[in-house]
Image (cartoon, grey):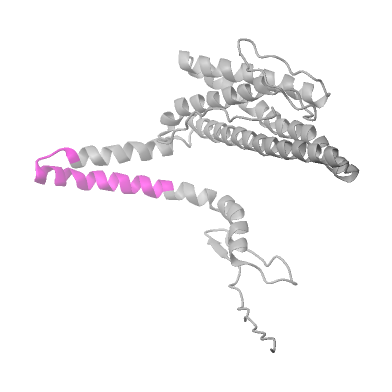
Amino acid sequence: MALLVQCVSVSVPARPPQLTIPHFGIMQKGWDGLGKIPDPGDLLAKFQDPMALALAPVRRFLEIVEAFLAVKNCIFAIPDSIMRLSPSPIFDCLEGLVEVLAKLLGWIPPLSYIWLALDIFDYCILLIDEILLFFTRLDNKLTEYTEAMSLATLIGDLELIAIVDCGISEVRPSMVTALDMLKFIQMISDVLVEVFLRLIPTEEMQKAARDYAAAGAHISAAREAMATGQSVLPEYPGMVVEAITQNPLVPVPPLGALLGVMNISRNAMVLLYNILAPMVGSSERRTSRELPTYNNF
């Protein structure tokens, strides 16, 4: 039987995206290479970051236009309210006007720094979430490594034992690197928390600031202990951690206190975010979360 060969024609890809920026020019995305047919989806995704940067000033202009439209709506709402003998059109337009004006006032210090703080706090929340998810992946890898080591030891496979040893040796440096990311952003967020604590000395803000400061100090100490190869991490005052039985192959000490403190720091950031967001007219809120469970940490 003859082999049937059928060629699938390759279409010419769409040209890379471009964006015309007022008073700036045309920003274009180039091809990624010469020896391959580019994927249009990849080109569009890679274009998003520079496009967001270029559109930052345009977004401010659109917020001004939005404010003018809100004022216009209120002007038209007055005769509409008179004709309907109901104040509801005015109330509806005022609600939108207040929200838009709060955005415009957010350009002016000190409100502009509140927007900066919200973005940094939001970044920290997402970063801790990603680190905890990263630890989950490491936890799953360690489970696979310990199972593979048991099998390799049972059958006497020296090559597999060496491979597993190499994989396990990467766990501790990976954790130290992840904690370094938190340390990098901590310097800026520390200053912001202190500033807003002086400006808004409410009991809720004070509690969030205390929780955040204590958690940050513990994370820094745990990072140093992890980097220097210590077998025990510092304890967190007042935190009761359930003891776990670790496999001897796990290259890090129990992380119960560290993981719990990271979640405390995250939830403190959530509280700070939710306190500051209404001050600049933001209706977005962040939610607290429970700590994931781990088998090896």
Q: Residue at x 29, y 37 (%)?
A: 95
In the rendered image of this protein, does residue 128 appear above or below residue 205? below
Report the residue at 63% width, 67% height from top.
39
Is residue 55 shown to the viewer in this render? yes
Residue in the foreground of this view, choosing between 290 and 176: 290
Q: Residue furthest bottom?
A: 2
User: Residue 10 lies in what quarter of the image?
Assistant: bottom right
Q: Position of residue 121 (x, y in %)?
A: 56, 31
Using the rendered image of the protein, determine whether residue 202 is visible from the camera's viewpoint.
no
For the magenta stretch, what is the residue range?
63-88
Q: Split into 4 quadrants, where in the image is the C terminus?
A: top right
Residue 30 occupies which quadrant of the picture?
A: bottom right
- In this orientation, which residue lies closer to the viewer: 79 or 184? 184
Q: Position of residue 262 (x, y in %)?
A: 62, 25
Tally of numbered tags: 0
Q: Which residue in the rendered view is the most extreme toward the top?
A: 238
In the rendered image, residue 100, in percent from the top left (x then y), is placed at 37, 40
Q: Is residue 71 magenta?
A: yes
Front residue of 159 and 142? 159
Q: Is residue 85 above or below residue 65?
A: above
Which residue is at a point 54% across and 48% down the rendered structure image?
Answer: 56
The single residue placed furthest to the right in the displayed view is: 158
37, 73: nearer the viewer? 37
Magenta segment, prevailing SS (helix, strand or loop): helix
Does the segment drawn in magenta span residue 148?
Answer: no
Report the residue at 81% width, 26% height from top.
227
Asked whether, in this view, residue 93 is left or right of residue 168, the answer is: left
* Horizontal side of residue 96 vs 133, given as left or right: left
* Residue 164 horizontal side relative to residue 100, left or right: right
Q: Position of residue 272 (x, y in %)?
A: 51, 25
